[in-house]
């Protein structure tokens, strides 16, 4: 049965999509069977994982959630791993699913393919909406990427409250695997402050920072435009090295 991770933070631009792609690619490179799912209507994950831009638009996660296609029909195979993409239509689902509070749709669909994978990684939109709740309901672990900017700390406590809510209702086994600092520049004073604050928040929310910190680097920003994950685009770059450490840590942490 697959272990499922959801990358989440209600703030945008903190590295959720970049980290989802790196985690999927890193796990796949380690020989694991990986499925990556895009739950963000922005639909950037598929592209980062090498999905053809004119991929079949009738088999996205939207059609799966609306029960129009089976999850198997929505699987797209890329050189990196299997992907279920999304597109802007998914913002419609946000409204449609909200009305009857359907938080377990994704979980139900995933049951069908969970035995085929070692890991499922889910990218989420920058909000706590019905799509994000579906991801939480379907997952074992939350990973919280946080850009090394003070402001992105805001919302973490709120996230913790949401997690507690999810735990006591739809998913008692949900756990926070850790907080990952991204766009990190150890030379700045800000980075030191953020590191300290992030450690405190991690403690207060019963989790821990990942030792790996993803340094800021142009390669990370350029990779998606080339339809590649960071390992494929710039394997010797700082972000690639840091993501490699991160993937190793993820595998370590889920052991206990
Ligand atoms: N380590 C990094 N260094 C530099 N730029 C980064 C890094 N990680 C992500 N970015 C860039 O920051 C922007 C936001 O990242 P993204 O992963 O899309 O965040 P989110 O999914 O949380 O909105 C993107 O343009 C991305 O390429
Ligand atoms: Mg994103």
Image (cartoon, rainbow, N blue to C red):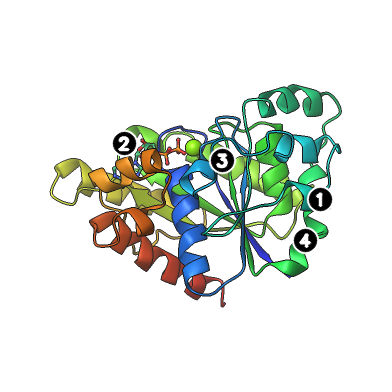
Query: Residue visible at 46% across and 45% down?
Result: 48
Residue shown at the point (40%, 42%) measured from the top left: 224
Q: Is mark 4 on a helix, strand or loop?
A: loop
SS assignment at label 1: helix
Side of 255 relative to 147 (left or right): right
Q: Which of marks 3 and 4 is nearer the N terminus?
A: 4
Question: Is label 3 in a helix, a strand or a loop?
Answer: helix
Whether residue 35 is visible, yes or no, is yes
Q: Which residue occupies the foreground of this view, 142 or 92?
A: 92
**According to the image, label 4 marks what residue?**
113
Q: How crowded is mark 2: few (under 14 residues within 10 Å), some or many (20 or more)?
A: some
In the foreground, 155 or 240: 240
* Dot placed on the residue nearer the N-terminal end, 2 or 3: 2
**Label 1 CA crowd tier, 10 Å (few <14, some 14–19, many 20+):** some
Residue annotated with mark 1: 109
Respond yes or no on whether mark 2 lies under 8 Å from ligand 1. no
Residue highlighted by disc 2: 150
Question: Foreground: 1 or 145?
Answer: 1
Residue 46 location, x and y as percent?
55, 44
The residue closer to the viewer here, 53 or 162, is 53
Give how far apart the Cα atoms at labels 1 and 2 are. 38 Å
> Is residue 156 placed above or below 91 in the rendered structure?
below
Q: Where is residue 254 in the image (x, y as percent from the top left)?
A: 56, 71
Quarter of the N terminus within the rendering: bottom right
Q: Are marks 2 and 3 in contact (CB under 8 Å)?
A: no
- In the picture of the structure, the residue carrying the numbered disc 3 is 159
Task: For marks 2 and 3, give the CA distance.
Answer: 16 Å
Quadrant in the picture for the C terminus: bottom right
Q: Is residue 55 left or right of residue 215?
A: right
At label 3, counting other C-alpha atoms closer than 10 Å, the crowd grade (few under 14, some 14-19, many 20 or more) is: some
């Amino acid at each position: 049965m697959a272990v499922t991770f959801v990358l989440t933070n209600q703030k945008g631009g903190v590295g959720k999509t970049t980290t989802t792609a790196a985690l999927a690619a890193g796990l796949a490179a380690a020989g694991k069977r990986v499925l990556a799912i895009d739950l963000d209507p922005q639909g950037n994950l598929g592209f980062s994982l090498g999905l053809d831009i004119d991929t079949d638009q009738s088999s996205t996660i939207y059609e799966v959630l609306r029960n129009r296609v089976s999850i198997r029909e929505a699987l797209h195979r890329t050189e990196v791993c299997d992907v279920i993409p999304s597109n802007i239509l998914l913002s419609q689902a946000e409204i449609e699913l909200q009305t009857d509070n359907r938080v377990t749709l994704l979980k139900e669909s995933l049951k069908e393919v969970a035995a085929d994978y070692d890991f499922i990684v889910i990218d989420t939109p920058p909000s706590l909406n019905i799509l994000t709740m579906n991801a939480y309901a379907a997952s074992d672990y939350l990973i919280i990427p946080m850009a090394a900017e003070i402001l992105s700390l805001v919302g973490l406590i709120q996230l913790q409250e949401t997690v507690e809510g999810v735990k006591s209702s739809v998913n008692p086994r949900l756990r926070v695997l850790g907080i990952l600092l991204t766009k990190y520049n150890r030379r700045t004073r800000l980075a030191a402050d953020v590191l300290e604050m992030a450690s405190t928040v991690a403690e207060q929310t019963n989790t821990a920072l990942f030792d790996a910190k993803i340094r800021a680097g142009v390669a990370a920003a350029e990779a998606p435009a080339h339809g590649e994950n960071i390992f494929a685009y710039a394997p010797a770059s700082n972000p690639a090295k840091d993501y490699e450490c991160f993937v190793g840590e993820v595998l370590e942490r889920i052991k206990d």
